[in-house]
């Protein structure tokens, strides 16, 4: 079976998702926001965060592209969930890094994780690979939750 890649939608979803992540990092102050925060010893180096999020945003974008290309009645709902979780994702760095609202950020992260899990389930119904591509994101959010909780206790 030959798979034909539709480049415009693929670029839209991947570059769009990367752009949201990049803008979120700039608006939220991302790694600069760690200045003045007591962080746990398991906190990765800043470069690890950059690489991890870039890979995750690419996987997310490909996942959304696969659902978009599937077309059908369920895709609109699934993609609306995707955009919703992306919006929630966008705001987390603002709450955590810029505002230092660590407890609120953790609650926000829980909301994000629930939205991503629901999105992955809906994506899997449409295209199993699309759902599976979100698993690394879910795992990273779990790790981020642990870090967030540790920051709460240290600050």
Image: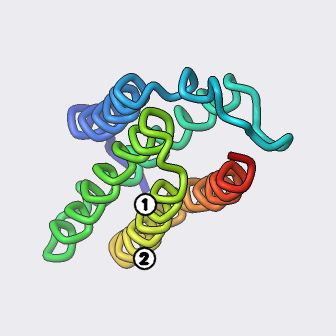
* Residue 14 in picture, x, y percent from top left: 35, 36
The answer to whether 26 appears left or right of 135 in the picture is: left
- Identified at 38% across, 44% down, the residue is 61
Viewer-side residue, 94 vs 36: 36
- Identified at 35% across, 75% down, the residue is 122
Please say which color scheme the image uses: rainbow
Specify the quadrant that holds the N terminus: bottom left
Q: Which residue is mark 2?
A: 121
Which residue, as the protein is rendered here, is positioned at the far right?
41
Q: Which residue is mark 1?
A: 108
Viewer-side residue, 85 vs 98: 98
Please give the label number shown on residue 52. Answer: none
The answer to whether 133 appears left or right of 4 in the picture is: right
SS for dot 2: helix
N-term mark: 2 or 1: 1
- Identified at 29% across, 41% down, the residue is 13
Viewer-side residue, 154 vs 88: 154
Distance Cα–Cα, label 2 vs label 1:
20 Å
The answer to whether 148 appears left or right of 104 in the picture is: right
Rendering quarter of residue 50: top right
Viewer-side residue, 34 vs 7: 34
């Amino acid at each position: 079976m030959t798979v034909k890649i539709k480049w415009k939608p693929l670029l839209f979803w991947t570059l769009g998702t990367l752009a949201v992540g990049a803008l979120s990092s700039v608006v939220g102050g991302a790694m600069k926001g760690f200045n003045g925060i007591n962080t746990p010893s398991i906190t990765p180096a800043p470069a690890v965060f950059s690489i991890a999020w870039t890979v995750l945003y690419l996987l997310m974008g490909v996942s959304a592209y696969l659902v978009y290309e599937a077309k059908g009645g369920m895709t609109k709902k699934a993609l609306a969930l995707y955009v919703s979780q992306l919006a929630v994702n966008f705001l987390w760095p603002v709450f955590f890094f810029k505002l230092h609202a660590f407890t609120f950020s953790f609650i926000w992260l829980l909301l994000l994780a629930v939205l991503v899990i629901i999105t992955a389930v809906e994506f899997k119904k449409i295209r199993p690979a699309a759902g599976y591509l979100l698993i690394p994101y879910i795992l990273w959010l779990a790790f981020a939750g642990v870090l967030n909780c540790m920051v709460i206790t240290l600050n």
